[in-house]
Amino acid sequence: MELETIVFPAYAATLGLLALYGVHRVAMLARFRWEEESEAAPLAAHVPKVTVQLPVFNERTVAARLIQAAGELEWPADRLEIQVLDDSNDETTSIVDAEVRRLVERGLDACVIRRSDRRGFKAGALDHGLATARGEFVCIFDADFVPDPDFLRRLMPSFSDPKVGMVQARWGHANREDNLLTRAESTLLDGHFVIEHKVRHDSGLFFNFNGTAGIWRRAAIDAAGGWEHDTLTEDLDLSYRAQLAGWKFVYAPMVVAPAEVPPDIAAFKSQQHRWAKGSVQVFKKLGWRILTSKEPLSVKLEALAHLTGNVGYPCVLLLALLMPLAIHNMPEYPAWMHVGMFFVCTISVVMFYEQSQRAIGRPFGRRISDIVAAIVLGIGMCVSQTRAVIEGLLPGTGVFVRTPKKGDGRSKTYRAIWKGLPGIELVLAGWFGWALYSAVELELWGTLPFLLLFFASFAWVGGMSLKSFVRG
């Protein structure tokens, strides 16, 4: 069979699959509502004890700020316990000790908990801390988060319903305006927190605790089987196990906890690799359990769509490999077939992120530039994310790699583990450079915007990756 007879059908099939993801986004947008929430109900006469867990590992640039913020939480001191779960093996330990000592001097119940090894990574640290935690509720913050003092006061009333097992706040982005990359990253995250979480919560579907800026009922953690570390996304894993056990989750999008997005492309790739690989691992672990559960079909389908969402990255990579070859066969096929499906794929993404940015009040000019940057970044990430998906399908858990923070520097201690060859995306940029030349020769003007989009994506991500590697 000749190559030409295979390429275009495979290309069209890949586009069709991506178009289904586009239809899913449009369906979410149709159900999306964004409105100011009414004031939370006041706390009951009985104020429950809350344990605040702060897992840290070599967080010298942000540990002090985190502990200080935890100490400012507005909650009765006799009903608050602060655990710093410090697995660090660098100067972070002395910073943590000094800050916790200051909290104790102020009369707060604060302590440092250290382990002899990092077994289970973050999940292991959280589980180890729970063994001595005295709170009926557990609030968790990662090292780069800076919660407002009223965080507990605004979220805890949701637990007046005894069936509520977890309440999640929305992530803010403290360093959004640093550069185009951080704005693109923030836009991608907003799609998840502004639209996906909100629609899933409002529609009675499963959604997940994001590992930080949320509060758990201790009983829900125990009933779901506790923290497990056989995946790289222990938060996603526990979320689905808890909801399958019957616990309700609440999303509070108007409560925003500021945090940092990764400051450079190496850190971003490391973070996204862990999230993508972990979500595939959770699908392997719980997919059949979800399918055979007594949950409504709508809950099952959305849960599976959520856990398999990263499959879109291999599809984008396959599309990128096929597109330059497919354009040579395009004159034999009606233009609407190509342009129509590609339009569905791209316009749904534009609408999705535009709506999320409009909802949080981003100005029109900045929305447009950030959305374009987010789409370009998302396409350019398909190489490293495809590797993450493949690794997630393979046996073994892998190593939990912390996301480097702003100010970490380039020392070996803080460098993200490199995923994939540095700048490999530049090869694909060259591939699309050839495709652009071919499209002009064949006068396929309708393909140029899409080819330019992919060329820019791989050139930008590849260039940043190579630059980061050389500087490292």
Image (spheres, grey):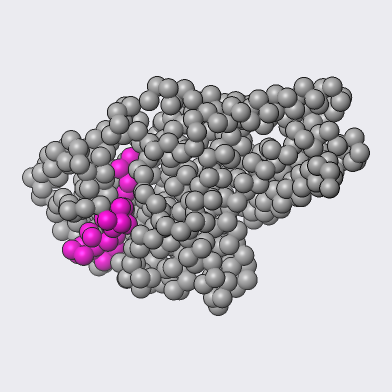
In the depicted structure, whether residue 350 falls above or below residue 297? above
458 lies left or right of 54? right
- Who is closer to the viewer here, 339 or 322? 322
User: Percent x, y for residue 49?
Assistant: 23, 63
User: Percent x, y for residue 228?
Assistant: 35, 63
Report if residue 20 is visible in the image: yes
User: Percent x, y for residue 197?
Assistant: 52, 54
The answer to which image quadrant residue 76 occupies is: bottom left
Residue at point 54%, 75% (across, down): 293
Residue at point 63%, 71% (across, down): 297
Residue at point 84%, 47% (across, down): 1
Report if residue 364 is visible in the image: no
Q: Which quadrant is home to the C terminus?
A: top left
Residue at point 82%, 22% (across, down): 440
User: Percent x, y for residue 436?
Assistant: 75, 25
Look at the image and give the residue range highlighted in magenta.
119-144
158 lies left or right of 424? left
Q: Is residue 134 magenta?
A: yes
Residue sitting at the far left: 105
The answer to which image quadrant residue 407 occupies is: top left
Residue sitting at the far bottom: 294
- Who is closer to the viewer here, 78 or 183? 183
